[in-house]
Amino acid sequence: AGGPNSNAASSSAPDAVTAADADTTAKWMHADDLSSDDEDADGAGNRIGRVPLHWYDDYDHIGYDAHGQRVVKSQSSSASKDILDRVIDAADDLEANAAGNGKFTVYDALNARDVALTPRQVELIRRLQSGAFAHPEHDANPDYVAYFSGVDPEVSGLNSDRYEKKSRFQPSKWEKLQVRRLLHRLKCGSINMDYLEGRVRDMNDLVSKSKDEDPSGDKPFLLWKGDEEDELALRKGPQHMPAPKLPPPGHAYSYNPPEEYLPNEQELKEWEELDPEDRPYGHFVPKKHPNLRSVGAYEHAVRERFERCLDLYLCPRAMKRRLNIDPESLVPSLPKASDLRPFPTAKVVAYEVPETNATKKEDAAVMVRCLTVSPDGQFLVSGDENGVVRLWEVQTGRLLRSWDLMLVLSVGEENDDQNDKSQQGEPQTKKPVSSLEWNPNRSHHCLLATIGKCAIVISTGTGGPDDSELTDALLSAASACKHGGNIAPESRAAKAVKWTSLQHKKSSKSSSNVNANTPPISAYGTASGPICLLRTNRECTHVQWHRKGDYFVTVSPKAGAAAVLIHQLSKAASQQPFGKVKGEIQLACFHPQKPFLFVASKEHVRVYHLVKQMMVKRLMSGCRHISSLDVHGSGDHVVVGSLDRRLVWFDLDLANTPYKTLKYHERALRSVGFHPRYPLMASASDDGSIHVFHSMVYSDLMRNPLIVPVKVLRGHNVVNSLGTLAMVFHPTQPWLFSAGADGKIHLFQDL
């Protein structure tokens, strides 16, 4: 459909404005009301929004206006007429338009009425349908004004407020990089000066020119250069795989072979019956010729060459590179043992354990079960299987004091109301001293010993004037404790442990022996001997001090939840930290710096926070039965020994699994430990040997500990499958004490 003057407008270009249309252009200039806000200024239009219009098919209105009034459907609209009326109206409109006085109407479905389009709107629709700009007055090709190049900047004012860039006053980094690359290529020979000066556009032109000038190739070259395989390996495409070489010919292929290689008639008949693949030499039959000129052509040469070609073509091959590795490079480079001194190397002092009447009759030595050294390194204490604790002088090997703890047990049992009747008339068997530990505080001269179900506090009497007063103050509560110690009756520890003083006993034969304390070694000492006794419900096997020397922990593996007990000596008090335990507890020790407690079962080591009362970490050792445990002075490393010959090193900052697992011993490990001052570690085993390791722990967390075996110390005999039972380092010197099942105690020094 076209509007007025549509024929005249269609004859001209769609985007051109002619002189004849000048009046129309001026008339239509800015005549479009492009604002959509004023289309329905009076609010009479339909305002139903997105409501479907077919909802109003059965009503006389089409919706509601802005004032809430119904918008009534127009009866004269094309929608209310039938198809025949619509055809007649369309024909009338077409005739009217041809005459030039018609109107172009469209149906507004939203308002249910016919809308007559203006000539301006019809013209816009026509231009859009023809692909031209909608507005006829739009100039699609305006005159170009060169603001940046044709107009004087001083007149136009463009870029008048801009400053020169800083890079304009500095050398270009990109040019510097290009020059560096060109110099590098010039040194390598990939380009020359002709290329740089522009005489040659491509270096390939020089290569082709050199070939054209010297086609004969008179330049000398190496005949046997041996880099053919390298050239094949560097070329593009699939990897070249050389064919496998044929085996070299043997004596049978000679023109004059020895007699043993010549077949007889019977062998020839046997070969003929076999396939060529099963014959010794295939198709070839050894023959003897008088000279080399008599040898004729090989009749199967072409056949064998063809079969080899088939093998190379049909059989798949793969390139296997042989690893050319030096075996010595796989071994870690460890420093020499001589560069890691000092460490104990030779046996210097032997401590002779006195023989008892029982040992004289049985002609067997008393096993020394445990050892401990004073913090100043002057005294050594040992405990044997007969329940005797002995105090030695380190430098001379002299025995200073001996305490028989079996007498202390008898006194404790006589004063126990529950066991009074059961112990009368029964012979008392000897019990070994299972653990010894000297107080780590230099001012406290006392030690702990475990025997049977008891842990005994012993005063050594080796302190000076100030140390003796501090030791007496520490032991005052334990020596005067009554009624089982200062433990709350309703607590769990009251049922698990009982404190008993050994200083205030009724006079009896056995108690007189105990109370007759040996005179102290030091002139300032006030007491020397057992002070108090802690009795548990089950066998007590291990004891360990806290680093401050007031708290200590005892372990009773068969006691269940009461297996681990923490005691305070200055208050004669005890506490049970666990209500239940997992597995059978074997060992326990304190962290040297943090409030942590290490508890070792047969297979795992658990770390507990004593303040927060929670488990921090569980170390999985991979051992079947843990026998010994020690913590490094830094607190970040733990070493564990087991009865299945394993020495396990844990790095607490690294993982829960072992950092190193060493198996140098042939039998079970009995004792492991770190040196408190030197980077040394040692392990004692039932094979009678002691392995000394250099164990350097660095403060840098990025460096792993250095563990180097430096010495194997031997000096104990294996008795009843038991060897070295105890081992302890000297606190200030690179010395080591050892005790074994043969009843000997040795001191190893660095010589």
Image (cartoon, rainbow, N blue to C red):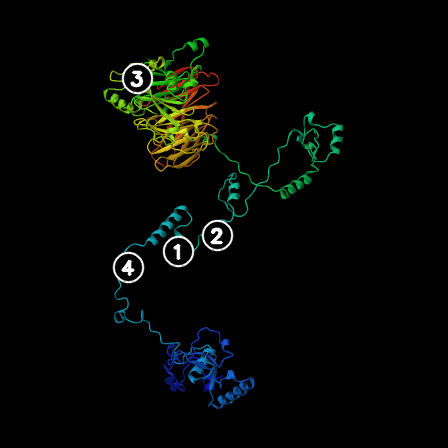
Element at badge 4? loop
Q: Earlier in the sequence, mark 2 or mark 4?
A: 4
Q: Residues within 10 Å of mark 2 (few under 14, many from 20)?
A: few
Bin the neighbour count of mark 4 within 10 Å (Cα to Cα): few under 14, some 14-19, many 20 and up: few
Whichever of labels 4 and 1 marks the residue nearer the N terminus, that label is 4
Residue 82 position within the rendered picture, expressed as x and y whole percent measured from the top left: 55, 84
222 relative to 30, above or below: above
Real-space CA distance between mark 2 and mark 3, rounded to the nearest whole angstrom = 106 Å
Find out whether the residues at labels 2 and 3 contact each other: C-beta distance under 8 Å.
no
Give the mark nearest the N terminus, 2 or 3.
2
Q: Quadrant of residue 743?
A: top left
- Name the residue carrying label 3: 528
Going by the image, does 309 lie left or right of 454? right
- Cα distance, mark 2 to mark 4? 47 Å
Q: Nearer the viewer, residue 661 or 286?
A: 661
Q: CA distance from mark 4 to mark 1?
A: 32 Å
Q: Is residue 260 above or below residue 55?
A: above
Res 208 label = 2
Lower position in the chain sequence, tag 4 or tag 3: 4
Under circle 3, the secondary element is: loop
Residue 117 in percent (x, y) is at: 44, 84
Q: Which residue is denoted by mark 4 in the rendering?
A: 165
